[in-house]
């Protein structure tokens, strides 16, 4: 009997949408290796020349005009993509989407970005007979996520479910699964052991994540962070931003044995477990990973719109605060003088059952009729026709 196939479509606007798709694919593979998954950034795959220009323009807009991004988010907040917009997207960027689906023959399509969700919805209007699940990757639901043809929505919280039902989506079509994170975040590892493995000092440690957007906070906060370097270890993880890494390594202020400056790392899960405090932008994926690891978070430079909503959610839960010099000083003081109490709080901190990190993958398997208890070993990769092979855009679970 042919193995079940799950096709996950995303777009590269930020890293969270595609990260959620990969995380879900890996979770499904781990729980049921005989289910085959493939992740594709659809626009990049179909238009590898044009897509990078669009993504670059988006990044520059977010960095230079965040208020404009916020205004656009709010003015369109209650609106789905209209028929004309879907037609334009399909004609200009997604003409061959139906061919990809026909060649890969999935049993289920999951979209982790509203644009491919809209494109697949249009194809379903035209007769595509494959279930469409929309996975919302933040702690809010913009109107662009909503399509009448979606068979199910997978959402982070009951609040997001309420937003969707308030827009006319049937409650039976919305399942609270939490946002999926990679299985590396499903368990917590020994802090002392990890610090030794990673070559870190066994002292209070703060992980500061910047990544492709850079570190968008001023001198006052940087001075607060570096004021106690003799007592508190700082790990700056800047993702693939090589220019920023080089600039920081050349900064005399950061030339200290308790300061580590890293570029891209595939061990963020270990760095979170080895650290006592996370300073980051409130992207949906990073917040969820931090929640899975139970690490307290300080948020900076939330992009107006979904990141502001993410920040509000975690602050209201008491799992995070908004970064400023006074907050830094408060937390650093607690790390130095109330360390045992903070450690105990972290060990006790767990997510609600429906937001456990493996819950989304387990739910998808149940809906597929392949619960995790039926998992079998020895899955081969999902082979595809040569027309849709692209190492940069396609991921095949091992």
Image (cartoon, rainbow, N blue to C red):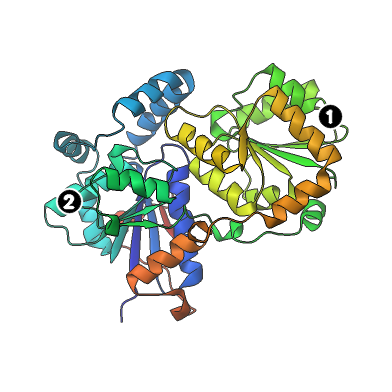
Vertical order, 352 against 261 (above or below):
below
Vertical order, 246 against 165 (above or below):
above
Q: Is residue 363 left or right of residue 272?
A: left
Q: Quadrant of residue 82?
A: top left
Q: Residue at x 41, y 46 (%)?
A: 159
Where does the N terminus fall, quadrant-wise? bottom left
| Foreground of the two, 27 or 153 | 153
x%, y% of residue 183? 56, 61
Q: Which residue is mark 2?
A: 123
Vertical order, 214 against 19 (above or below):
above
User: How far apart in space, not on screen, are marks 2 and 1 (Cα)?
Assistant: 57 Å
Q: Quadrant of residue 145?
A: top left
x%, y% of residue 388? 31, 55
Vertical order, 105 against 218 (above or below):
below
Secondary structure category for the residue under label 1: loop
x%, y% of residue 330? 75, 31
Q: Which residue is mark 1?
A: 228
Question: Can residue 385 be seen by looking at this rendering?
Answer: no
| Foreground of the two, 259 or 104 | 259
């Amino acid at each position: 009997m042919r193995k079940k196939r799950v096709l996950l479509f995303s777009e590269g606007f930020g890293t969270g949408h595609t990260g959620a798709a990969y995380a879900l694919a890996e979770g499904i593979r781990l729980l049921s290796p005989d289910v085959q998954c493939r992740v594709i950034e659809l626009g990049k795959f179909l238009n590898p020349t044009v897509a990078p220009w669009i993504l670059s323009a988006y990044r520059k807009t977010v960095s230079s005009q965040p208020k404009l991004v916020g205004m656009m988010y709010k003015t369109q907040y209650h609106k789905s993509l209209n028929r004309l917009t879907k037609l334009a997207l399909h004609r200009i960027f997604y003409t061959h989407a139906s061919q990809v689906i026909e060649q890969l023959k999935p049993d289920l399509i999951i979209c982790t970005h509203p644009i491919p969700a809209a494109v697949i919805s249009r194809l379903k209007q035209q007769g595509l007979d494959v279930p469409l699940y929309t996975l919302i990757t933040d702690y809010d639901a913009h109107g662009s996520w909503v399509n009448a043809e979606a068979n199910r929505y997978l959402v982070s919280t009951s609040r997001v479910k309420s937003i969707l039902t308030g827009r006319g989506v049937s409650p039976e079509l919305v399942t609270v699964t939490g946002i999926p994170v990679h299985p590396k975040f499903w368990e917590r590892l020994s802090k002392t052991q990890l610090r030794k493995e990673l070559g870190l000092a066994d002292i209070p440690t703060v992980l500061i994540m910047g990544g492709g957007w850079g570190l968008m906070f001023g001198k006052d906060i940087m001075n607060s962070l570096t004021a106690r370097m003799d007592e508190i270890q700082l790990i700056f993880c800047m993702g693939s931003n090589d220019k920023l890494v080089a600039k920081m390594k050349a900064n005399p202020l950061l030339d200290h044995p308790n300061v580590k400056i890293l570029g891209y790392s595939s061990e963020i899960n270990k760095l979170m477990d080895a650290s006592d405090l996370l300073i980051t932008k409130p992207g949906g994926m990073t917040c969820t990973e931090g929640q899975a690891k139970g690490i307290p978070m300080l948020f900076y430079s939330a992009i107006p719109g979904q990141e502001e909503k993410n920040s509000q959610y975690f602050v209201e839960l008491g799992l995070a605060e908004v970064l400023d010099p006074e907050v830094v000083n408060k937390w650093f003081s607690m790390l130095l003088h109330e360390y045992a109490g903070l450690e105990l709080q972290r060990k006790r901190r767990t997510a609600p059952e429906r937001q456990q990190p493996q819950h989304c993958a387990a739910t998808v398997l149940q809906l597929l009729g392949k619960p995790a208890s039926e998992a079998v070993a020895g899955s081969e990769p999902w082979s595809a026709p040569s027309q849709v092979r692209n190492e940069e855009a396609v991921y095949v679970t091992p």
